[in-house]
Image: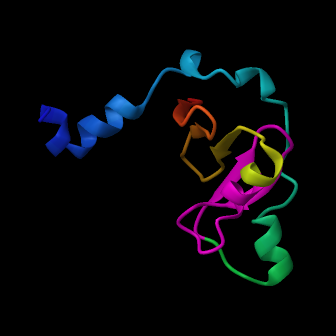
Amino acid sequence: MLASDNDPLQRLHERRISMSACTHLDQIQAVKPHTRGCEECLKMGDTWVHLRLCLSCGHVGCCDSSKNKHATKHFHATKHPIMRSIELGESWGWCYIDELELDFA
């Protein structure tokens, strides 16, 4: 067993891979959020926990902690690989294909 197996902070640190390891950075576009909330949840009259922005097209979807998980559903439907959090004070993103956390700070 590794020392990091028992240390969640160390596991998080190890998971943060440099952006140079992501092979999909060329698909990032200069996008603006389409809406101020999760696009699908707004249409359904539903709620969300946190918001994620697709960096290929500007779609705003709810996170995987939300019951509808629209950001991940958007990836599966479109194959747009990279999203970022648009929560105040957060500067991280995720590449769904490479399964890498990205730091946009």
Residue at the top extreme?
20
- Taking the spot 25% from the left edge, 35% from the top edge, the residue there is 10
- How many discs mark residues in the rendered view? 0
Q: Where 88 sits versus 61, above or below?
A: above
What x and y, as percent, mark residue 17?
A: 46, 25
What x and y, as percent, mark residue 33?
A: 83, 50
- Taking the spot 81% from the left edge, 82% from the top edge, the residue there is 44
Q: Where 59 sits versus 18, above or below?
A: below
Q: Quadrant of the C terminus?
A: top right
Out of 69 and 52, give the one closest to the viewer: 69
Q: How is the image coloured?
A: rainbow
- Taking the spot 79% from the left edge, 84% from the top edge, the residue there is 45
> In the displayed structure, does residue 44 sit left or right of residue 13?
right
Residue 50 inside the magenta-drawn segment: yes
> In the displayed structure, does residue 1 sit left or right of residue 37?
left
Residue 85 inside the magenta-drawn segment: no
Q: Where 49 sits versus 5, above or below?
A: below
What x and y, as percent, mark residue 58?
A: 84, 46
Q: Where 15 sits versus 86, above or below?
A: above
What x and y, as percent, mark residue 77?
A: 80, 54
Out of 30 and 10, give the one closest to the viewer: 10
Q: Quadrant of the N terminus?
A: top left
- Determine which quarter of the picture holds residue 74: bottom right
> In the displayed structure, does residue 64 sit left or right of residue 61?
left
- Taking the spot 72% from the left edge, 82% from the top edge, the residue there is 46
Residue at the bottom extreme?
45
Give the magenta-colored segment's residue range: 49-74
- Determine which quarter of the picture holds residue 4: top left
> In the displayed structure, does residue 38 sit left or right of residue 14?
right
